[in-house]
Image (cartoon, coloured by chain):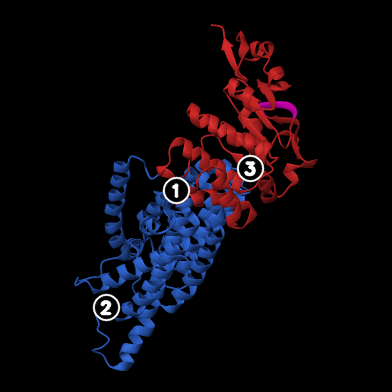
Amino acid sequence: MLVARKLTLDERLRGVDTQVRSGQVTAICGPNGAGKSTLIRLFAGVLSPSYGEVLLDGERTADIHPRVRARALGYLPQEPQIAWDLSVRNLVSLGRLAHGDTHAEPVEAALEAMDLHDFAQRPVSTLSGGERARALLARVLAGEPRFILADEPFASLDLGYQSALARHLRAQASEHGRGVVVVVHDLSLAHNLADRVILLNEGALHAEGAPADALSPGNLRDVFGIEARWLGDLGAQVLAVRK
Amino acid sequence: MNRPTLVLLAALLVAIPLSLVAGRASIFALDDARALLIVLELRLPRALLAVSVGAGLGAAGAAMQGYLRNPLADPGLFGIAPGAALGAVLSFSFGYAASGWLLPIFALAGAGGAMALLALMAGRGGGIALFTLAGLMIASLAGALTSLVISLAPNPWALSEIVTWLMGALTDRSWADVALAAPLALAGIAVLARAAPALDALTLGEDAARSMGVDMDSLLALLVVGVGLTIGSGVAVAGIIGFVGLMVPHMVRPFTDRRPSSLIVPSALGGGLLVLVADGVLRMLPLVSELRLGIALSLIGAPFFLWLLLRYRRSGALGLT
């Protein structure tokens, strides 16, 4: 379990208490500037809080050696740039860095899980946006982390790739028991993908819980200033917003 | 050992003996004693110095490009080479350069000063952009101070000595220079090689690298020390030799898997080979006075750089995917 306790960073995030669990998909939602990226980066240990702490199974992540922490928490940055034109396999094997090995098995498993075997030798510059997103997620999976922390992984993907990536993330939680945390802008996607939603507003926790509760019309009115309601259709939820 | 490493190592092992025969005086036309003297006291130390200086420049260039995630980065960006040059120029100005040890020691002190200033400026958690800017400012400060020292030169001889030395050369070097530069360059390359895995992680950006357990402050420290040792020792014995650090990683990169870590050792070998060959060719050119190595490499390097920019422009991305 990954717990945020009174997590604070300057004005960006103020005293957030929340938690994410293994085997679940947790979506972090909220308007621009709500502190979504700040929260996930604090979880990942990329940023240090000015007050409060992140606990991994009761241990402060700040006290864990960075490489040990990196083995438990796999972080996928928002729109990561790839500076050098590595092959897909070499990109994915970067995920083993914190383990200090080039253990082939998890790398192959990650390539397999993301359907990248046919691309393994290709330079990343030749991949499409969706293939690239899969390769970057495969890098995180190769580290066999207990938690996957992804900052807007759907941002530059078309609908087809979005649903494929959502399926992959879902499987990581339900089949491999990993904790999956995603920052998501698309509230319908969040509703359908996540087991739990953390709704942030102006650096503070506004609501958390099951998607239907956290993303209730009332909360959406308070946070986004919109009048909207959920339409259940074919088992999926679509958000209808009144103009 | 990857394939470029093996190929370059083999080429170097062929080039070093060849460079011993290269020169105005043909050692085959001389009697054995004099030929041996030329080879052992002049050409062998010179060859080893060329390899040491070039290797340091190549490795530092590869590491810098990895650290700044930019194929156009050059070790000169750190301001360490200008710092070392300032130290050396000061030793000329004080008239200390005549003593064999003081010039390189002044140069190393200059490199150390630049490194300390860099560490102070960019300090803990400064980030790569701040660090690059600090390096650029230190470079221009050291350049301005060097110009000041030159303009205040006590006499025309000191002036001419300084200017000639700044052009970079390996003429008339001795075993003492090898003994000074080679261990420092080797130590620097070892430090840079230690930074290699973290440079790989940096391929995906600073945030990703941090999340992968890379301590950015220790990485910066490794780089400053590694570049300081390789570049500082090179400037101390050979003056300013530009473009090797920029060119060599580019020439080597297409033959590697493009990971920064795969590039450091081959770039060191390639840099050594390039400087050794360039120096060997220069001393055989039928000119009245030998063309200075620093000038020659810049004459090759600058057009190479332009060609590189054109190629990146055509491919639509400035080296970045």
Q: Which chain is red?
A: A
Q: Colour of chain B?
A: blue
- Disc 1 or disc 3, which is closer to the eye? 3
Q: Chain of mark 3?
A: A
Q: Position of residue A147 (x, y in %)?
A: 68, 40
User: For the view shown, which residue lies furthest in the front direction?
Assistant: A234
Dominant secondary structure (helix, strand or loop) of the stretch shown in magenta = strand
Residue at left offset 22%, top offset 71%: B285
Query: A112 or B94: nearer the eye?
Result: A112
Q: Chain of mark 1?
A: A
How much space separates mark 1 and mark 3, taking CA atoms?
A: 21 Å
Q: Tell which tag, 2 or 1, sits nearer the viewer.
A: 1
Element at label 1? loop
What residue did someone put label 3 on?
A74
Q: Which element carries disc 2, helix, strand or loop? A: loop
Q: Residue at x 29, y 65 (%)?
A: B292
Asked if residue A15 lies in the magenta stretch, the reply is: yes
Residue positioned 42% across, 67% down in the render: B269
Density class for disc 3 (Cα within 10 Å; few <14, some 14-19, many ≥20) is: many
Q: Which residue is mark 2?
A: B23
- Range shown magenta: A10-18
Q: Gap in Å between the C-alphas at discs 2 and 1?
A: 41 Å
- The residue that disc 1 covers is A84
Q: Amino acid at mark 3?
A: Gly
Q: Nearer the viewer, residue A135 or B193?
A: A135
